[in-house]
Amino acid sequence: MKSSAIITTVLFSCALLSGCGSSGTADLQQWVKNERNSRKPRVEPLPEIKTHESFIYTASDLTDPFAPFNLKPQGVATGGPRPDPNRRREPLEEYPLDSLKMVGTLTRANQSWAVVQAPDGAVHRAKIGDHMGQNFGRVKKITENRVDLVELIQNPLGEWIEREANLALAE
């Protein structure tokens, strides 16, 4: 019984080893070799480099844009709107306009107030003529949905100009 097990093992091993021999793939290997040799990689030619003409900038006859004369605002107008430096600042002027939230309105005897919440959580009320925002904004109109303001800002020439802004009801 022991010898039959040995014989079976030897025969099985021989069968397995016979599978590792030449399996007839020589023609496949020859075909792969031929295909690799027949295909040449195609490389696109490099684009032609264009030469650019150099340009020398000479501005010796022009004024220097960084001269002190050109850095100062020219022609500052004295008329027109300007903020009052002696006016007492109101609490809502401490915050930028985009950080304030309109949370409602109050009306009593034809007087309307906008209820405005500051970023610190404090709630203030503002009426027409009050100031809010850091650009000297003055309340012009109060409706149920928004507060219309006119801000004073400086343009690049140093002139004060009016700009319309509004604060919408927060939802």
Image (spheres, rainbow, N blue to C red):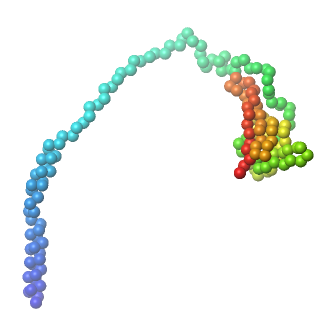
The picture places residue 51, in percent across and down from the top left corner, at 36, 21
The quadrant in which the N terminus is found is: bottom left
Q: Is residue 129 left or right of residue 62?
A: right
Question: Quadrant of residue 155 in the image?
Answer: top right
Q: Residue at x 13, y 49 (%)?
A: 33
Q: Residue at x 72, y 17 (%)?
A: 75
Q: Can residue 48 be seen from the camera position used here? A: yes
Question: Quadrant of residue 61 in the image?
Answer: top right
Seen from the viewer's position, the closer of residues 165 and 61 is 165
The picture places residue 163, in percent across and down from the top left corner, at 73, 32
Q: Can residue 94 be seen from the camera position used here? A: no
Determine the residue located farthest toward the right in the rendered image. 109
Seen from the viewer's position, the closer of residues 22 and 27 is 27
The picture places residue 166, in percent across and down from the top left corner, at 74, 39
Q: Residue at x 76, y 20 (%)?
A: 77
54 versus 41 height, above or below? above
89 versus 70 height, above or below? below
